[in-house]
Image (spheres, helix red, strand yellow):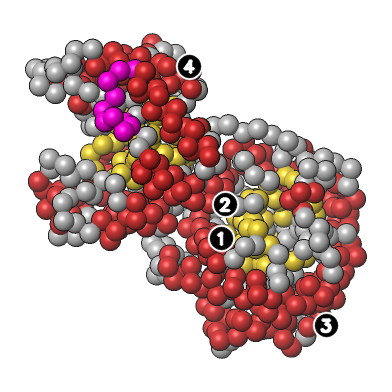
């Protein structure tokens, strides 16, 4: 059997083209169930697969795009998922012989909350049923396609990863403005989804190949995995009440060298394409080599926005206010299951200039596993900032991350064995970033060297789990200068060493530094400016503290990280 992922080092892989529009051309009427053709007209489906193989496709996609119980229920076929998927895989395998078969999974057809009523768990179960049937029938790859909502895509990816051993590919659909229907841009999609264990990520449907070029180009800026592009045969137009695609096969195929140049290494077709299109695509890419790229970056994301972190960017502000410690009202609200105060606080911090929000619901006696996901879900519905999930209860962290749109930071892992063992597998599984606390077996670090030793231990262990150091923010631990005056300078020096010796990003929560001193805001904001000049990349602060934010804006001008002083002047 052809291993397409190995083969990618030699050549571009070609998937097949459209199924739905091909079925229509071969007799499927409006209102009929396309996937039921696997049962009623297997010879038609077989013939489509064979034509694609003869055209040169390396991979065949099953006729299962809508074979989930929710979509099938529209035809009274909700109990036929297993039969339809089994039959679809069987037909594809017969037709493809030694070529891999990819299970096509399209959107459920109902929106997830808050856009609709479906929950993440319900979506997960719908996908799981399809995945299990397909693997049993012998499918090789899961191709999750035409997704508009990153959370629905995530439910499908996790259903595939957790219930099968098949390779998993996911393509999202972008509109002409290069955003999905739910507002996600190509960079945000890749940053958010690639770390979930995907084998390739990309774009399909919606537009023709011309409009896809810039989407692929953006994706490849942040992609650590192969990129797939499956365009339509041009933009759909309605003619005589029918949807048609106007781009001719020759013109369609002519864009593929450019798609490969911009970073696509797996290509194919979507609606309106036929075996003739795939034949010409195959010819167009047959002598091309996929581009080899090394992508190193640190970024987190919400549903609609990516925030890059690092030396080349301004110091990023993580809002610290959603934390009940020392806050009576917020603690009481959380205990009563009321998340409205946390949501208000999120909105307020966004207005004040936070770029990421820390979310902590840790009140003694609270059911964090239930509350943390609820708070995260409500906050992400109203605020478009990436989130930092802050809890020592790893089960609560995992539950919150599952239903989160975007890429979070997990706060935190320490250099202690049990913490590394508990937290890093979750960081890896969900492709998150993580705060690495430079606290080890000896407790709080006494100087810069102990901080760096602890940081090294975290980085090494993370690498063993396959987590690159770009995904770690080393917390250089701020202690109180009023009890130990050298504490602040040790933190600052550790920030510098972490950057220069270890090449990692850093974070601090800095209000501790001034504890017990008068004029705390003065000490805090001065320390922030100093930390910025030592190379700090991220700070956990109160973004509504004007002294802090003013100092930060001024520091960014002086450090040449606010080009044209744009933020400062505004
Ligand atoms: N592979 C599916 C995608 C539809 S958007 C089809 O029918 O061609």
Magenta region = 439-448
Q: How many other residues sit within 10 Å of disc 4, few (<14), some (14-19) or many (≥20)?
A: few
Specify whether residue 237 is in view. Answer: no
User: Label 2, on which residue?
Assistant: 197
Residue at x 82% of width, y 40% of height: 289
**Mark 1 to mark 3: distance in Å?**
32 Å
**Mark 3 to mark 2: distance in Å?**
35 Å
Q: Is residue 237 above or below residue 464?
A: below
Residue at x 25% of width, y 56% of height: 368
**Mark 1 to mark 4: distance in Å?**
38 Å
Left or right of 519, for residue 551? right
Q: Please state the horizontal and vertical placement of residue 357, each as a whole percent of the image.
A: 32, 40
Q: Earlier in the sequence, mark 1 or mark 4?
A: 1
- Beta carbon at label 1 within 8 Å of ligand 1: no
Of 428 and 276, nearer the camera is 428
Helix, strand or loop at disc 3?
helix
* Residue 43, disc: 3
User: Label 4, on which residue?
Assistant: 500
Q: How many other residues sit within 10 Å of disc 3, few (<14), some (14-19) or many (≥20)?
A: few
In this view, the mark in front (3 or 2): 2
Image marks 2 and 4: residues in contact by CB distance under 8 Å: no
Left or right of 510, for residue 141? right
Q: Earlier in the sequence, mark 1 or mark 2?
A: 1
**Mark 4 to mark 3: distance in Å?**
64 Å
Magenta stretch prevailing secondary structure: loop
């Amino acid at each position: 059997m052809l291993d397409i992922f190995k083969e990618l080092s030699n050549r571009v892989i070609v998937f097949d083209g459209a199924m739905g529009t091909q079925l229509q051309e071969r007799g499927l009427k409006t209102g009929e169930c396309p996937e039921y053709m696997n049962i009623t007209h297997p010879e038609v489906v077989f013939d489509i697969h064979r034509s694609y193989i003869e055209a040169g496709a390396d991979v065949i996609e099953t006729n299962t795009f809508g074979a989930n119980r929710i979509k099938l229920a529209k035809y009274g076929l909700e109990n036929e998922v297993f039969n339809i998927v089994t039959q679809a895989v069987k037909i594809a395998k017969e037709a493809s012989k030694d070529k891999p078969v990819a299970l096509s999974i399209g959107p459920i057809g109902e929106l997830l909350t808050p856009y609709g009523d479906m929950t993440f768990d319900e979506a997960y179960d719908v996908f799981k049923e399809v995945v299990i049937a397909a693997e049993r029938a012998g499918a090789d790859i899961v191709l999750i396609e035409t997704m508009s909502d990153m959370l629905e895509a995530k439910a499908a990816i996790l259903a595939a990863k957790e219930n099968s051993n098949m390779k998993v590919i996911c393509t999202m659909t972008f509109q002409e403005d290069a955003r999905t229907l739910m507002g996600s841009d190509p960079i945000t999609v890749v940053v958010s989804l690639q770390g979930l264990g995907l084998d390739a990520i990309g774009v399909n449907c919606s537009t023709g190949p011309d409009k896809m070029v810039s989407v692929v180009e953006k994706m490849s800026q942040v992609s650590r995995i192969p990129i797939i592009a499956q365009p339509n045969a041009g933009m759909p137009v309605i003619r005589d009440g029918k949807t048609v695609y106007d781009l001719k096969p020759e013109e369609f195929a002519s864009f593929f060298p450019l798609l490969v140049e911009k970073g696509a290494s797996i290509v194919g077709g979507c609606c309106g394409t036929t075996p003739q299109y795939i034949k010409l695509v195959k010819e167009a890419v047959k002598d091309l080599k996929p581009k080899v790229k090394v992508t190193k970056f640190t970024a987190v994301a919400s549903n609609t926005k990516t925030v890059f972190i690092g030396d080349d960017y301004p110091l990023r502000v993580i809002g610290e206010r959603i934390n009940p410690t020392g806050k009576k009202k917020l603690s009481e609200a959380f205990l009563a299951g009321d998340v409205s105060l946390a949501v208000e606080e999120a909105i307020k911090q966004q207005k004040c200039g936070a770029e990421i929000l820390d979310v902590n619901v840790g009140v003694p006696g609270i059911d964090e596993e239930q509350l943390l996901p609820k708070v995260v879900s409500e906050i992400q519905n109203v605020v478009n900032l990436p989130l930092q999930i802050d809890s020592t209860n790893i089960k609560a962290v995992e539950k919150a991350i599952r239903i989160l749109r975007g890429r979070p930071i997990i706060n935190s892992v320490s250099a202690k064995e049990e913490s590394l063992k508990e937290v890093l597998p979750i960081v890896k599984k969900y492709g998150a970033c993580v705060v690495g606390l430079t606290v080890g077996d000896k407790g709080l670090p006494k100087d810069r060297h102990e901080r760096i030793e602890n940081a090294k231990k975290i980085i090494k262990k993370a690498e063993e789990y396959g987590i690159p150091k770009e995904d770690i923010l080393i917390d250089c631990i701020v202690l109180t200068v009023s009890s130990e005056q050298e504490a602040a300078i040790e933190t600052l020096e550790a920030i510098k060493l972490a950057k220069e010796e270890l090449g990692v990003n850093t974070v601090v929560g800095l209000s501790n530094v001034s504890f017990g001193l008068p004029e705390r805001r003065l000490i805090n904001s001065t320390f922030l400016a100093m930390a910025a000049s030592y190379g700090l990349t991220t700070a956990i602060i109160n973004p509504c503290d004007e002294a802090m934010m003013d100092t930060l804006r001024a520091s960014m001008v002086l450090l040449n990280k606010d080009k044209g002083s744009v933020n400062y002047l505004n």
